[in-house]
Image (spheres, rainbow, N blue to C red):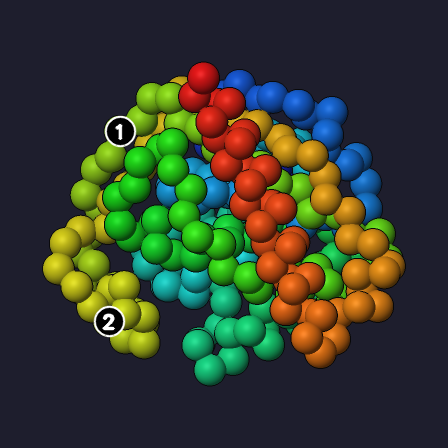
Amino acid sequence: MFSVTPLTLSHGFLTALGTQVRTYYPERVPVSGPVMVVSNHRSFMDAPLLMASVNRPVRFACHHYMSRVPVMREVVNSLGCFPLDAPTDRNQSFFRKAVDLLRSRQVVGIFPEGAQPMVKATRPNEVGTFQRGFAHLALRAPIDDLVILPVAIAAREETTNSAFPLRFLNLVDPSEPLFDQPGWHPMVIYHQVNVLIGRPYRIQASQHKDYHGKQARSLVAEVTEACHQEIYQLLKEGFS
């Protein structure tokens, strides 16, 4: 029986929307091995866009509300995303699932800005503060050849619509303070977008070894800042 792969679906999705994509530095994408893609995040289009640009299947971690809202649910399921569990078990679930995927030499996608830019309209040339969970994962995961690949999404032309009230999402996840406010969930649709692949950040054996005690905090900050700065600079380039 014929089945559509997430990678094929991503290309088809962008074609159907008529999105014009220009990818810079595709030669930086590792052709094999475990990779963690990290990127800025403003649209439901980001996962298929990144997958099509790196031209490898990517298993994206996503907020668990996206697996419950109609339309979003169908998109994340079709793309093979793995929703995070309820807040009480979110970190443990994320770590276990991500490590299993990376051990099997797959690509895991993470949006370190979290849900904030998805539910509050942001400017396309800005990147918010990064949460540090991805850096903890990279340093803790028992994987010797892990690569973090920073990627910037620079939307040159886009349309923003109001999808549904944020209070509707509060019914799905009452523990998320972002949903307990007035206003609407924006839906950003890219028409012209530049995707810039950053320089691969390779986790060294010495970093795994030093990930303990007080050194762990400084290492996590170092990895987080390196990826944030790379995406920030790529984003500036994408709009130049």
Could you say whether the residue bearing mark 1 is in a helix, strand or loop? strand
Q: Image quarter for residue 81?
A: bottom right
Amino acid type, residue under disc 1 in the picture: Thr
Q: For residue 231, which numbered disc appears in the image?
A: none
Viewer-proximal residue among 138 and 175 = 138
The x, y position of residue 179, in whole percent, is 25, 64
Name the residue: 80% across, 68% down: 210
Residue drawn at x 60%, y 45% as measured from the top left: 227
- Closer-to-camera residue (55/156): 156
Is residue 19 in sight in this rendering? no
Q: Is residue 161 above or below residue 109?
A: above
> How many numbered circles does the render carry?
2
The span from disc 2 to disc 1 (Cα, nearest Å) is 27 Å
Assign the C terminus to one quadrant of the image: top left
- Residue drawn at the location 38% of the way across and 42% of the way down: 42
Q: Residues within 10 Å of mark 1 (few under 14, many from 20)?
A: few
Q: Name the spot of residue 125 as percent of width and height, x first.
A: 38, 32
Q: Quadrant of residue 190?
A: top left
Circle nearer the viewer, 2 or 1 = 1
Q: Assess disc 2: are there few (<14), some (14-19) or many (≥20) residues with their C-alpha within 10 Å of its C-alpha.
A: few
The amino acid sitting under disc 2 is: Leu
Q: Which residue is mark 2?
A: 171
* Residue 158 percent location from the top left of the image: 31, 26
| x 30%, y 41%: residue | 122
**Disc 1 target residue:** 159
Instruction: Label 2: state its secondary structure.
Output: helix
